[in-house]
Image (cartoon, helix red, strand yellow):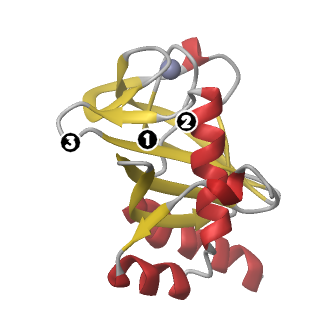
């Protein structure tokens, strides 16, 4: 049995329905959690104790917000996008807006700051303000953005 399949998930009916609508499988969620917990590459919210991480096994990036629950993990939400997050060169070129996110980079132990970064999808590049870690370059695409503007942009580009 695969190590990922051994990760026990606690998924409410509401989240299960959401995952179904978004075509996200339990095994996609397991892969994200496994990747985050083995590499330490994730965001943490010190106020709630929740973690947020992503993994891109193929052409889709999956994000999962979760928290440790006994032997397993409770899944709070999951979403995906196809657009690639690409920062323009060095993180030193980022322009900070001054706003700070509630999410902290787990590896750098630093709060995310809103920066102007570039997103790439097919041949197009979009400059956008997103919370990111200026030390390691971890960029947060939150659920509202992924299911809103990013989904719209992906759709618009495909319709061309
Ligand atoms: Zn970092």
- State the quadrant of the C terminus: bottom right
At a point 50% along the width and 34% down the height, the residue shown is 42
- State the quadrant of the N terminus: bottom right
Task: Tell me the crowding category of disc 2: few under 14, some 14 to 19, or many 20 or more residues within 10 angstroms, Cα based.
Answer: many
Q: Nearer the viewer, residue 59 or 50?
A: 50
118 in relation to 30, above or below: above
Q: Is mark 3 within 8 Å of ligand 1?
A: no
Residue 48 - label: 3
Q: Nearer the viewer, residue 41 or 99?
A: 41
Q: Earlier in the sequence, mark 2 or mark 3?
A: 3
Whether label 2 touches label 1, CB < 8 Å: yes
All told, the count of numbered labels is: 3
SS at badge 1: strand
Q: Earlier in the sequence, mark 2 or mark 1?
A: 2
Q: Is residue 83 visible?
A: no
27 in relation to 44, above or below: below
Q: CA distance from mark 2 to mark 3?
A: 27 Å
Residue 40 lies left or right of residue 159; in this view the side is left
Residue 64 lies left or right of residue 46; in this view the side is right
Q: Is residue 139 visible?
A: yes
SS at badge 3: loop
Residue 117 - label: 2
Q: Nearer the viewer, residue 106 or 2?
A: 2
Give x and y (percent) for residue 46: 23, 30
* Mark nearer the viewer, 2 or 3: 3
Residue ID for mark 1: 130
SS at badge 2: strand
**Quarter of the view holding residue 151:** bottom right
76 in relation to 100, above or below: below
Give x and y (percent) for residue 97: 32, 28
Q: CA distance from mark 3 to mark 1?
A: 21 Å
């Amino acid at each position: 049995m695969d190590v990922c399949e051994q990760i026990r998930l606690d998924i409410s009916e509401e989240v299960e329905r959401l995952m179904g609508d978004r075509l996200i499988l339990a095994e996609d969620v397991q892969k994200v959690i496994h990747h985050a917990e083995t590499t330490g590459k994730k965001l943490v919210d010190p106020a709630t104790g929740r973690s947020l991480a992503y993994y891109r096994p193929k052409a889709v990036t999956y994000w999962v917000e979760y928290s440790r629950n006994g032997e397993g993990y409770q899944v709070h939400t999951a979403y995906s996008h196809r657009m690639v997050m690409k920062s323009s060169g060095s993180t030193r070129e980022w322009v900070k807006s001054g706003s700070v996110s509630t999410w902290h980079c787990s590896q750098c132990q630093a709060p995310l700051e809103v920066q102007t970064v570039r997103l790439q999808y097919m041949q197009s590049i979009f400059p956008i303000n997103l919370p990111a870690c200026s030390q390691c370059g971890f960029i947060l695409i939150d659920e509202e953005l992924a299911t809103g503007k990013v989904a719209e942009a992906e759709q618009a580009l495909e319709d061309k």
